[in-house]
Image (tube, rainbow, N blue to C red):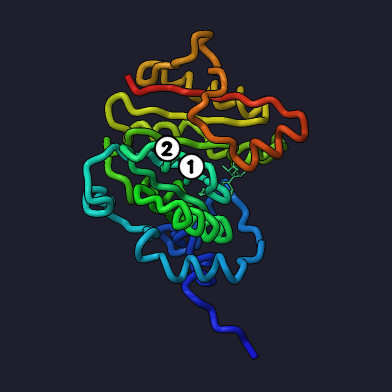
Amino acid sequence: MEQQLTFADKKRKTVERAEFTEDGRYLRKVRSFVLRTGRLSDYQREMMNANWSKLGLDYQAQPFDFRAIFGNDNPVVLEIGFGMGKSLVEMAQQNPERNYIGIEVHTPGVGACIAYALEKDVKNLRVICHDATEILRDSIAEGSLAGLQLYFPDPWQKAKHHKRRIVQPEFVQQVLTKLNSNGFIHFATDWENYAEHMLAVLRQFDQQLHNTSETNDFIPRPDFRPLTKFEARGHKLGHAVWDLYFTKR
Ligand SMILES: C[S@@+](CC[C@H](N)C(=O)[O-])C[C@H]1O[C@@H](n2cnc3c(N)ncnc32)[C@H](O)[C@@H]1O
């Protein structure tokens, strides 16, 4: 018998909006992700289905009203690609005076993050299961973010795939319009070539961004960033880690 698709199962199919050219043809976009077929466990599915109204946010074409969502005016930090969400939940727990919004397209990660947020009884976190670039463009008001964090994004190692890296000048430009004054951009990667690419892109915005690095490149790994799953995996493989931390001028 065919299994009935629940909200969580369907979500996987709606992580991006179909867009069309003026003459009605489907617009193929360069995406920073590939939807893996990774299985959504029964537990993750149940967590998503039962708690979405409390912890989930959906794509919307108008900016979110953060005050209505969180019930306060605390600064809002956005994390893109939180993976399984453990480090994001830990950060939210350690910083109750901030609100966090995490975006991830991988539904098992979204389910796992919701489960962990409930376990830790974290109130200052909401999750979104959608392409972050669309959320950033359409659902986030200008000047409304205190910070943007992106930890261990897919490195797209082959040169022919570099265009799929989420960090591009257009992306940083978009982030800049969404940050409030003094807002921060925090990137981390364990892929040297991507670290150099991130630095080169951020340096194009010298007028608008200040590099907090004393050496004008990378900062030492900050204690406030919890160890992420991909970072731990990188450690096992002997990878180094590069953190970049810029603030809006
Ligand atoms: C290499 S993983 C790192 C996960 C986590 N930050 C960590 O360090 O363990 C990158 C994640 O970014 C997500 N991702 C990539 N592009 C995305 C996008 N445009 N919107 C939302 N999530 C995205 C992927 O699904 C993947 O889970």
What percent of the width, then of the height, locates residue 174? 38, 36
| Residue at 36% across, 16% down | 207
Point out the image quarter for the N terminus: bottom right
Q: Are marks 1 and 2 in contact (CB under 8 Å)?
A: yes
Q: Find residue 3 and report its horizontal and vertical position in percent.
A: 60, 84
Residue 215 versus residue 150 in the image, above or below: above
Residue 78 position, x and y percent, is 40, 41
Name the kind of residue labelled 1 in the image.
Glu
> Can you say whether 241 is above or below 131 in the image?
above
Tell me the quadrant of the picture where the C terminus can be found: top left
Mark 2: secondary structure: helix
Q: Nearer the viewer, residue 17 or 100?
A: 100
Q: Amino acid at mark 2?
A: Gln
Which residue is the extreme one toward the right?
237
Q: Would you place residue 153 above or below residue 104 in this image? A: above
Q: Is residue 48 left or right of residue 109?
A: left
In the rendered structure, the answer to whether residue 173 lies left or right of residue 191 reads left
Compared with residue 8, is residue 193 higher up or lower down, i.e. above or below? above
Residue underneath mark 2: 94
State which quadrant residue 91 falls in: top left
Residue at (46, 70) in percent of width and height: 49
Q: CA distance from mark 1 to mark 2?
A: 6 Å
Tell me what residue is drawn at x 42 percent, y 37 percent.
94
Name which residue lies at 22% across and 51% down: 71
For label 1, the residue is: 90
Kindly identify which numbered label has been placed on residue 151.
none
Within 10 Å of disc 1 (Cα), the crowding (few <14, some 14-19, many 20+) is some
Query: Looking at this rendering, what residue extends furthest in the top direction?
Result: 215
Element type where label 1 sits in the image: helix
Horizontal and vertical percent position of residue 64? 28, 51
Q: How crowded is the residue under tag 2: few (<14 C-alpha within 10 Å), some, or many (20+)? A: few
Residue nearest the observer in this picture, 35 or 85: 85
